[in-house]
Image (cartoon, helix red, strand yellow):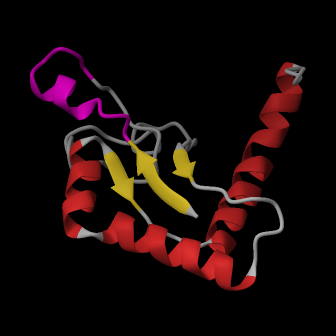
Amino acid sequence: MTIGWSFGGAAPYQKVSLSTHITLSGPQRDPQVPDVPTLKESGVNMEATAWFAMYGPAGLKGEALNKLESAMTKMVRDPAMKDKLIKLGYEPIGSNSVDLAAAQRTDLARWEKPIKATGIQLD
């Protein structure tokens, strides 16, 4: 289950001029820093996002999976929790295991060619 996308909590530093953000790598502007354009708006045809997820044991299915997804979705979408996550720089999602698997496949496909081109290898 995808818990959220992250701006990394950097917005407060931008607001008090401790850092200057020139662009965001996500698909749209962040409401916390609405004046900062995306890479695509800046002329760079690229998008990169970070996400956080919760995983259960391999093979988790049926009622156990449904209960876990339901509890996590409820927690992430709770107004108080959602507000805390947003203030920390996250965009709460609260999706399910099917959506998480799709996001993982998309990211793997997106990064496979650049990773191979660099010669990076996992040890």
Q: Quadrant of the N terminus?
A: bottom right
Residue lying at 21% horizontally and 41% vertically, measured from the top left: 33
Q: Position of residue 90 (x, y in %)?
A: 35, 48
Give the prevailing secondary structure in the magenta stretch. loop
- Out of 15 and 23, give the one closest to the viewer: 15
Residue lying at 38% horizontally and 74% vertically, measured from the top left: 74
- Out of 67 and 9, give the one closest to the viewer: 67
Taking the view exactly as shown, the residue that stands out farthest to the front is 64
Q: Magenta region: which residues?
A: 7-20
- Out of 72 and 86, give the one closest to the viewer: 72
105, above or below 6, in the image:
below
30, above or below 69, in the image:
above
Q: Is residue 119 left or right of residue 86?
A: right
122, above or below 62, in the image:
above
Q: Quadrant of the C terminus?
A: top right
Q: Which of the 4 image quadrants contains residue 57?
A: bottom right
Q: Would you say residue 85 sits in the magenta stretch?
A: no
Residue lying at 68% horizontally and 74% vertically, measured from the top left: 98
Taking the view exactly as shown, the residue that stands out farthest to the bottom is 63
Q: Position of residue 55 (x, y in %)?
A: 66, 56
Residue lying at 21% horizontally and 68% vertically, measured from the top left: 79
Q: Would you say residue 19 sits in the magenta stretch?
A: yes
Q: Which of the 4 image quadrants contains residue 11?
A: top left
Q: Is residue 29 left or right of residue 34?
A: right
Taking the view exactly as shown, the residue that stands out farthest to the top is 18
10, above or below 47, in the image:
above
Q: Total marks drawn?
A: 0
Q: Position of residue 2 (x, y in %)?
A: 54, 60
